[in-house]
Amino acid sequence: MAKVAKRQGYSYRVTDLDYPAISVATPTNALGAKIGAGKAFAFGRSVGVGVENLKSYYKTTKKSCPGTKWVLGGYSQGALVVSRVVASFDDSKVVYVGLFGDPWTNLPEGKGLFPKACFGKNLSSYRIYAPDCRTHTGSLGAKSPYVASGLENKYGLWCNKNDYVCGSSRSLLKNSGHLQYAAKKEFIWMAEKVEKRLPRYDNGSTTALASIELDEDEIEDLIEAHLSADEYRLGMEGTATIDASQSFSLGHEIVEYQ
């Protein structure tokens, strides 16, 4: 992210939001989070503290530096915090919102016996990476509308396979994917989305909630090819739309798909 900001002529500051997040690994916390849809019991109270802290940080920054542009990132419980607060931001100052392993995932195209996503059709605009075509609702329900008003086309959702929290798995015992978002490629992927949007703005400052430092060689050499789903399920007469537009590279321009 820092290298993206510098290339576009922005100053840059990263802030890790500090709040007492709690684990849902214990049955009591998990049940409380489920019953309250993420808003009640100990889990809900901890999310509430995060919400108030982010609101306070936004207000303070807006007062001291009103021209700040924002890149917001939230993982798991942090995705709930960002989702609840971002609607109160000045949408013209929000560059991008990246949500990873979101318990409030809402992908309508994954519903039904024959989900549209399995045919590569009707994909949500914010669906960046959800390789399981049957993923549709997060473990705490589906936030609707998923994208805050005024922020259309500024959202990105990542939901790995075998992630119970964001709904690609229906068993809490099958949740290994939820711990795999720290890979550098995920951050480079988000940085690529951010870079496409930064030129729309005048030079200013960008404040983010997550960042990763990368060597120039890592950026230059990385090219990742991705389809909208890892598998497609078709009948004898079925057709599918195969979409590779989420493939990415910060060091090169993609000019052709084969």
Image (cartoon, rainbow, N blue to C red):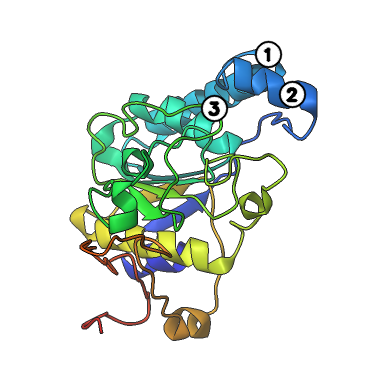
| Residue tagged 2 | 29
Q: Position of residue 137 (x, y in %)?
A: 45, 35
Local SS, label 2: helix
Badge 3, how many Cα within 10 Å: few under 14, some, many 20+? many
Q: In which quarter of the image is the C terminus?
A: bottom left
| Residue tagged 3 | 140
Amino acid of disc 1: Phe
Badge 1, how many Cα within 10 Å: few under 14, some, many 20+? some
Q: Position of residue 67 (x, y in %)?
A: 30, 40
Local SS, label 1: helix
Splitting the image into 4 quarters, where does residue 93 fall?
top left
User: Separation of disc 3 and disc 2 at Cα?
Assistant: 13 Å
Amino acid of disc 2: Asn
Q: Earlier in the sequence, mark 3 or mark 2?
A: 2
Are the two marked residues, 3 and 1, in contact with CB atoms closer than 8 angstroms? Answer: no
| Residue tagged 1 | 41
Amino acid of disc 3: Leu
User: Separation of disc 3 and disc 1 at Cα?
Assistant: 13 Å
Q: Where is residue 119 in the image (x, y as percent from the top left)?
A: 28, 57
In the rendered image, the vertical position of residue 17 relative to residue 98, given as above or below: above
Are the two marked residues, 1 and 2, in contact with CB atoms closer than 8 angstroms? Answer: yes
